Amino acid sequence: MSSRDLILGRVRRALADVSGEGGAPPEPGPGDGDSSYERAVGRSYLREHGARSPAETVDLLAENLADYRAIVHRATEEELPDLVARLLSRRGSRQVLVPPGFPSAWLSAADTAPVDDLAVSTPGELDAVGSVVTGCAVAIAETGTIVLDGGPDQGRRRITLVPDHHVCVVRVPGQVVASVPQALGRLDPTRPLTWISGPSATSDIELDRVEGVHGPRTLEVVLVSAD
């Protein structure tokens, strides 16, 4: 009997008295269960917790981002270049990493030298860059999570993990969803997904929080509306 059969047998024993869909309990087989038997699992869970307008969903996103210690800004498309310039200047960043499909207008007011996202860049070279500015694939209001999928305005995963300061632009309300199930419906699971809930942080057994261990110490999210 293989380890697989043993594990499946234990799962079937645990599900044997579960009522609902799936029919009668399985007949005994390898691992105390027929390896060909599969019990249907219901997926009737809520896809969204409560009814909200698009504006209320964006407000919830902003609230939960801030709760995770991200710094949240709001701007219109017209205001975005000046805001990004102020954020980079306040940080003292003289160089900024940009993805290959990065909208050049976002940096048009910034006094910084753009650094291209190159496959040959070393970790040391990436670490020497002050900031990275990207877009996102989707933002989840209920969890305060930004998801990147390596798209043209996001670049390689490592450019948002090595620099200490990440400015992420989220188009609202178009890129904002209420829940994780809704986000998964928009994402391609074959893409290199990065799920970001606040700046990088960890804590030891004493619960002492340390930021910037395995990603940016500072995450600034700009919620950009059309007007």
Image: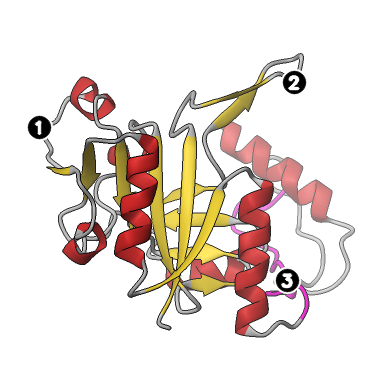
Q: Specify which label sits upstream in the sequence, 2 or 3.
A: 3
Q: Report how far apart the C-alphas of labels 1 and 2 lie in the structure.
A: 38 Å
Residue 64 got which mark?
A: none
Q: Amino acid at mark 2?
A: Leu
Q: Specify which label sits upstream in the sequence, 3 or 1.
A: 3
Report the residue marked by disc 2.
Answer: 207
Q: Is residue 171 left or right of residue 192?
A: right
Q: Secondary structure at mark 1?
A: loop
Q: Secondary structure at mark 3?
A: loop
Magenta-drawn stretch contains 44: yes
Q: Is residue 32 visible?
A: no
Q: Nearer the viewer, residue 50 or 198?
A: 198
Residue 169 is drawn in which quadrant?
A: bottom left
Report the residue marked by disc 1.
Answer: 120
Report the residue marked by disc 3.
Answer: 42
Q: Residue at x 70, y 74 (%)?
A: 48
Indicate whether 121 appears above or below 181: above
Rendered location of residue 182, percent (x, y)? 56, 72
Indicate whether 78 appears above or below 135: below
Q: Residue at x 60, y 72 (%)?
A: 58
- Magenta residues? 33-50
